[in-house]
Image: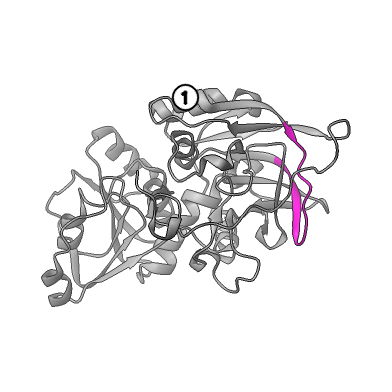
């Protein structure tokens, strides 16, 4: 895989997002600086090596030095952390510099901060001097890319990345929100421009972001239509809140206000053709390819809006948590495992034998 322009890391997908990043900053020295005889250790799940064909071969569950935060950072005692395909991509060597290894995996977590507050960790790490939306910082990273991630008993994060966890959410539920669900929240409520009562098409039902879009939209008054090649996934999407489900490329009963796109090349033409004049296509990923025909004549003649979307801000994560609290919406969880059994969860993700998130508990 070719390097990104400017010496950055290769292209990688994040929660359905495909992007190129400029060269990343050096990680903060958050590891314990004491001599070996004084270093405290904790259980963690790390990538020690990478392999495109056998990603599990680089997965290690063992003791890791206790992080020591510096300059605006703090620690969180992790109570629950969820897995993402981002973790599998790291083990395959996509978007990770080998000199960063070993590195603790994991983007999503909920736990208790140093003051005893129950918190959710926002995983987008911006530059120290960045002001505004963290996702717009060209030097941003996610936890587990430059800094050790959340699949550990203790994680170091910037203080500004902590969001209060509503008491109504369990640690396991809260730990599912910061990546796929946050991406879906931004796409639907921030980027689409569609209000409740409008119709949205979600391409690729069954994926993490697509499932979150279906649940969130169905719970908040949107008419949600979905597509999937799988009859089973179409049926499951209907259970999650979809109004109708179609095979990919199917002619729809009417054109929609917005298409929420994670698939990319395979569904791009259908997405554009499905929009009403003036409609919006929000894209957060390109799992089937990133270079479809642009169909510019259709875009300008029908005055379509094509909008990119990546992850979400800390404020959006806080709003998402409150929405879950107030509506009763919860992320589907396939299984909860002890951190020591992380390998079982990773194997399930790779096999595709899941419907819902895999969550790791530390106690």
The residue furthest front is 7
Percent across and percent down for residue 140 are: 54, 60
Q: Is residue 138 above or below residue 36?
A: below
Residue 9 visible at all: yes
Instruction: Mark 1: give few (<14), some (14-19) or many (20+) Cα within 10 Å.
Output: some
Display colour scheme: one colour
Please indicate, yes or no, whether residue 353 appears anywhere in the rendered image.
no
Left or right, 124 with reference to 13: right
Q: Which residue is under mark 1? A: 347
Magenta-drawn stretch contains 75: yes
Q: Name the residue: 47% across, 49% down.
A: 180
Report whether 301 appears left or right of 289. left
Q: Quadrant of the C terminus?
A: top right
Query: Horizontal placement of 235 versus 196: left or right?
Result: left
Number of marks present in the image shown: 1
Q: Residue at x 88, y 34 (%)?
A: 38
Residue 234 image position (x, y, % from top left):
27, 40
Q: Quadrant of residue 102?
A: top right
- Secondary structure of the residue carrying numbered label 1: helix
Residue 279 percent across, percent down from the top left? 24, 70
Between 153 and 200, which is closer to the camera in this rendering? 153
Q: Measuring from the top left, give residue 283's x and y in whole percent.
A: 32, 59
Magenta segment boundaries in residue numbering: 64-78
Q: In the depicted view, which residue is nearer to us: 254 or 174? A: 174
Q: Residue at x 45, y 46 (%)?
A: 95
| 95 inside magenta stretch | no
Which residue is rendered at x = 54% and y = 70% of the image? 133
- Quadrant where the image shows the N terminus: top left
**Placement of 159 over or under 56, stated as above or below:** below
């Amino acid at each position: 895989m070719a390097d990104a322009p400017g010496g950055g890391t290769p292209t990688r997908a994040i929660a359905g997002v495909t992007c190129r990043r400029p060269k990343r900053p050096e990680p903060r020295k958050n590891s314990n600086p004491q001599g070996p005889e004084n270093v405290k250790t904790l259980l963690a799940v790390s990538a020690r090596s990478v392999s495109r064909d056998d990603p599990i071969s680089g997965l290690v569950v063992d003791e890791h030095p206790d992080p020591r935060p510096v300059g605006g950072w703090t620690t969180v005692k992790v109570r629950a952390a969820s897995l993402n395909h981002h973790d599998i991509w790291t083990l395959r060597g996509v978007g990770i510099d080998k000199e960063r290894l070993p590195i603790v995996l994991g983007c999503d977590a909920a736990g208790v901060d140093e003051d005893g507050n129950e918190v959710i960790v926002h995983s987008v790490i911006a530059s120290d001097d960045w002001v505004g939306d963290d996702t717009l910082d060209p030097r941003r990273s996610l936890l587990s890319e430059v800094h050790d991630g959340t699949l550990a008993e203790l994680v170091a994060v910037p203080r500004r990345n902590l969001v209060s966890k509503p008491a109504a959410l369990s640690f396991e539920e809260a730990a599912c929100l910061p990546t796929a669900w946050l991406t879906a929240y931004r796409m639907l409520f921030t980027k689409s421009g569609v209000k409740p009562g409008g119709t949205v098409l979600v391409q690729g039902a069954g994926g993490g972001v697509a499932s979150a879009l279906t649940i969130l939209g169905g719970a908040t008054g949107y008419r949600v239509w979905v597509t999937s090649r799988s009859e089973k996934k179409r049926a499951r999407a209907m259970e999650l809140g979809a109004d109708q489900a179609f095979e990919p490329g199917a002619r729809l009963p009417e054109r929609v206000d917005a298409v929420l796109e994670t698939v990319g090349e395979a569904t791009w033409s259908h997405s554009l053709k499905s929009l009403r004049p003036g409609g919006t296509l929000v894209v957060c990923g390109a799992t089937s390819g990133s270079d479809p025909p642009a169909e510019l004549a259709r875009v300008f003649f029908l005055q379509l809006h094509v909008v990119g979307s990546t992850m979400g801000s800390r404020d959006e994560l806080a709003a998402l948590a409150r929405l879950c609290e107030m509506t009763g919406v919860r992320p589907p969880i396939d299984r909860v495992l002890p951190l020591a059994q992380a390998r079982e969860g990773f194997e399930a993700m790779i096999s595709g034998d899941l419907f819902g998130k895999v969550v790791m508990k530390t106690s």
